[in-house]
Structure formats: C-alpha cells, structure tokens
Amino acid sequence: MFSSFPERIRFFIGCGENHFTMDRGSFSYDETFLFKRELEFIKMEEAEHFDGQLLFYRDPETSETYVLSLTAGYRQESLTLKEMPENSPVNRFWITFPADPSEHIYGTGETFSEWDLKGLKVRIFTAEHQNAKRIEAKREREKREGKDPDHTLPFSEYESYYVQPTFVSSDKYFVFADTSRFMMFDFEKPEETTLYLQEPPRIIMHEEESFPELSKALRDLLGGQRKLPDWVYDGAIMAVQRGAREVERKIRILKEAGVRTAAIWSQDWCGCRNNTFGYQVMWNWRYDTDLYPDLPEKIKAWREEGIRFLGYINPFIALDRELYKEASDKGYLVKDREGKDYLVTITVFPAAMIDFTNPAAYEWYKSLIRKNMIGIGLSGWMADFGEYLPTDAVLFNGEPAEVWHNRWPAIWAKMNREVIEECGMEDEVFFFMRAGFTGSLQNTLMMWTGDQHVDWSKDDGLPSVIPATLSLAMSGFGMAHSDAGGYTTNDSMKRTKELLMRWEEMNVFSPVLRFHEGNQPWNNVQFDGDEELLSHLRMCTELHVLLRPYLKKLEKELVTEALPVMRPLFYHYDEEEAYTIKDEYLLGRDMLVAPVIEEGAVSRTVYLPEDEWTELFTDETYTGGHYEISAPLGRIPVFIRKAGGLGFLVRHVMQLAVIY
C-alpha cells in the first residue's frame, strides 16, 4: 500500500501537447513536450481534517509546491493531487511507486495477445482493435511467407476496444486511476510501476487476502454486472442474415436437425450494403421492409415457436438513408471544426456520429431503440462500436473531445441499459458490446470480444479469445463471450470447418453460445454446411443447455459476489504456473477448460492445478500436473473438480458422447 512507502513515491510533472491521427477507429499517437521534471520530496505530515498524510513536493525549477494527499481506509488508500500552483501550465503527471519484481500484472481492460503485463507498457485509450492497416499487413505477410499462427506483433502495436485504467497484481492488490484522458501504465521496470496521466492524479489502491475478495472490492468501487434474461441459456443464438425468408429456411434446418436454438440474430434487420469489405449492415435503425417485410408479425410467430429475434445497432447513422437527414437537420450529430457533420470512415464508407452530449440527441436515439427495436419485439441486439470518437471533434457541450473519447462507450452502454429499464424489459431483453471504459461495468450486460479473425492466430484468432476474456475478468468484467467461428474474413482468411467446430466446442463452456457468419459469409464455412456440422452443432447445443443450472449458479455468484464466470487458474490455485497460463481457464470454481487452439491437433498438453479432477468426456481421474489429453474433433479437454459436486455432468455427457 502507498502508506508503506510514502517517501519512495516519485512525482513528476510536465507540459505537453497531444497529436492524434485517426484512421478507421485506429489512433496514431504522438506528443510534444515542453518540459518534464521530477519534483523533490520535501516532507510528510499528518493531515488535520482526514485520516491520512500530506506529501509535499517542490518543483526544483520554480520552487513551487505540489501536495499529494494520502488517505487511508480499510484495505484501501487513495493518492490525490490536493494542491498545485494557480495558473500552472502543467498538464502531465507521472506517479512512480515501488513494485515487486516477481509479481504478475493483469487487467487494464482487454488484452488479446498478452496476459501477464509485467515488463510491458499499456496504452489506456479505447480504439478499433482490428484496424485496417494491421489486417492488410497480415494479409500481405501471409501471401509472402505463408500462415504462421504463432506470429505476434510487438505489444505496442496493439489497440483495444475495451480499456480500463485498472490493473490487478498477483500480490492481491489493484490500482485504479480515476481519470479519463489518454493514459499509459508502465510496468517495464521490474522494481517499479509508473502511471502516466494527463489529468491531476486520483489513484486508488486496494489490497485483499484473496482474489475473490479483490474482485468484490473492485465491483464495490466501479459497479458490477446484472443477470441476463433466463432464455439466453436455452440454446444457441444463431447468426442468420439476408432476409426473413432465409431466417425461416434456417429455422427449419435447425429444427429438423434437433439443434437447441434460443434465438436468431439478424444484424441486417435494418438493411444491408455490399462492398469490397463484404456484407455489412445499413445503419438506418428501423426494419428494412424489403429484406424483412412484416417483421413485427414474423417476430411474434418465431417467438411462438420458441425462438427469439435479435438485431444490431451502433452510434453511427448511414448517410444514404432517411434517419441521417432527420438527425442532421436537428443538430444531433458530432461536428467538425467547421461546424459540419463529422464524417468518419468505417471500413470503406463514411457515416455520422450521434452526439451523446446533446440531451435532445441522446433522448432521440433512445426513442429509436424503444420504438423501432424493443417496440417491434426484438429480444436483444449487438450494441457495436463506441470507440471511434475523433479527438478533434466539436461536441454539443463545448468540452474537448479528448476528455470524452474514453467515456464514449460507457455512455453508449448507459443509453442501452436505460431504455431497456424504462421499458420494463430487464428480464426479457439484453445487449452485448465490445467497447468499454470506466462506467461500463455498471451499464453493460454482456461483453463480446470483438472481431476476431477466422483463423488460428494467437494475436487475432481463436486463441486470442482466452486472454481477452481473462483480462476482462481481472478488470472487473466477469461475463463475456466471443463470436463462434470468428468474424474478420478476406481472401487469405477463410473459415474452415475445423475452425468453426473447435470454436463451437470452446464456446459451449462460456455463458453465451452465439455465432457469426463473418463479414464475407460466402467465404466461410457455416453451421449447416453438411450433416457432420449439423450433428456437431446439435451436440454442442445439448451440452450448453446441460450446463444451464451450473451457468445460472455462476451468474448468481457474479451478480452477488462479483466472481467472474470464466476465471484464471490462479484465482483459486496459488501455483507458480497458474499465474502465466493463458490457454486454459476455470469455468467457475469446479470446471477447468483447455480448448484446442491449434489447427489439426487431436490432443493437447493440459496443466492441472493440484486437486482431484475427472475428465468430463471419459470419466478418467487425474491429480495435479501436466498431461497429454486426447482431443479428437468433437471433444476438448474439460475437467470437473471432484469436490465440486458436478459428477452428474460426467454421466450425462458420456451418454451424449455415445449418441453423437
């Protein structure tokens, strides 16, 4: 805790100017410094009006005094800039404090290629993770050199949809920076941690004796998730597009194959556009009468068959449809510096952004969700994007867009949550997001891990889902899922049958089993490609429904105790190897999942923590250690903790294995 080493807290100040360049949601960043200097620690004294100390620092250049207040509570302390000189040009702050060289660092939102962040520097600025330049560079590299799933970029070249100015240490403490501008968390030096902030610091450190207690403390500070509607656990959420007739055709296929289907997700419910990137949504938030004639009536009919209907929305408006004109005429859109609608290019087309700081625009957008989505019977939707606010935009409230950029996805989440609650549909309707920041925890019902590539690459494909989900869990977000089969497709990345089946097998052991066709459905194997695929899907949905009571139990633990549904191994096992494994996870306390993440693999090495385990598909027993586990297509290594009381699952699963 800070109070154990107050005189070793180093404080730097500076003055600088940011330079951002955005391209399709990816932000290149540079800055110009006028000065940076370390302040001299003068003294520490007890504070008169609160339980804590005042730390006095002197600027060696100007002799001006800066005061940090260090307040102490039960297991929690805060470090806040209490006083700085008036009219100071200072707008940069560095706080450096001692660190354990042997500790491991997790969190900061969502990280895909790395899991333990010790030795790395993390940028806290929400952005498009799958930026166009990086995808094209990968495409060209694979054309020259062939596919290499182990190839990963330097960590500094990644961006993330969900950033959270919080990290968790293996020493069982977390640190949270309560600011919203651009930040950097620097863990590169083993013996110290540096937080670089562009607002006066307010930093909270909290320690506990266990990770469950630490998760609960983080929830108490930042908020937590709510329960999902019960129907979500009734089967798969199948992605189907290209109109009502296609939806009805696919429903017939699913029913005839005996696939447990909870819902159909049609992201093109509001229309589509075909372009060089693929098949994309027309961002005009009312149902398309050509693709989906009489959609409200069809939704009712599908609901009577036990299948719900989900859609899609984001904070943009398509320029080539009627809602844009209404929003523009009413002044509801984010502006550029010339007072024109700020047009942002997404993939290959421009769109305008709703200005959430305009109360009238905020309410108007909610009315679209209320009337055009919930009002026609949608049971949920993907609330996409949120990370694209340009830093040079002009907002209705007159504040700098840089201040609001990170906040934007949390406001977007708040809007979606509010309209569901105002309609009294909390037990019926849910939404899922990819972008987030401080404030998202209390407003977002479910995360999905974004637009993974339809491949086996560790930085962007199937393997990246596991560290992404676990880093979210250690940032306080305990329930997430991924697109089964991935999304991002091009002429060098096309979904294979094996990839789809392995992704399905993994997602069975997650809260939500939801699919995606990808941006180029015609280049991807789909769930009904042949009888083997349908049989495999039927088995996966049966397994997922079989897990319903256990998943509901884990959901309750998340809501009441802040325990993440999918957890890192070290959460319950204080073993050295458990702190670095990023290709396995615990599903609750009593199940360990080791997905197959290599193409062509029919077995994989599994690390089991010291305990008694039963393999779910074979009833074989194991203790702690490394094992080579058979994993033919249709089965991944899953283990039940003997003391957990889930032995009945083994019997049921083995019966299913005989059938399939």
Image: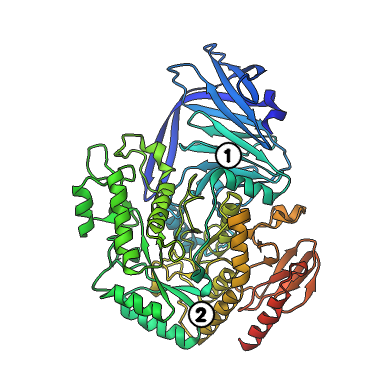
- Mark 2 and mark 1: span between their CA atoms? 42 Å
Mark 2 or mark 1: which comes first in sequence?
A: 1
Lateral position of residue 413 relative to residue 192, left or right? left
Q: Position of residue 620 (x, y in %)?
A: 77, 77
The kind of secondary structure element at disc 1 is strand
Q: Amino acid at mark 2?
A: Arg
Residue 334 shows up from this direction = yes
Front-most of 92 and 436? Answer: 436
444 relative to 143, above or below:
above
Q: Which mark is residue 278?
A: none
User: Residue sitting at 33 percent across and 59 percent down?
Assistant: 369
Q: Which one is in front, 606 or 490? A: 606
How many C-alpha atoms fall within 10 Å of the one at disc 2: few (<14), some, or many (≥20)?
Answer: many
Crowd rating for badge 1 (residues with CA inside 10 Å; few <14, some 14–19, many 20+): many
What residue sits right under mark 1 in the picture?
A: 176
User: Relative to residue 656, is residue 65 drawn left or right?
Assistant: left
Q: Please indicate, yes or no, whether residue 113 appears anywhere in the rendered image.
A: no
- Specify the quadrant of the image occupied by residue 635: bottom right
Secondary structure at numbered mark 2: loop
Which disc is residue 260 wearing? 2
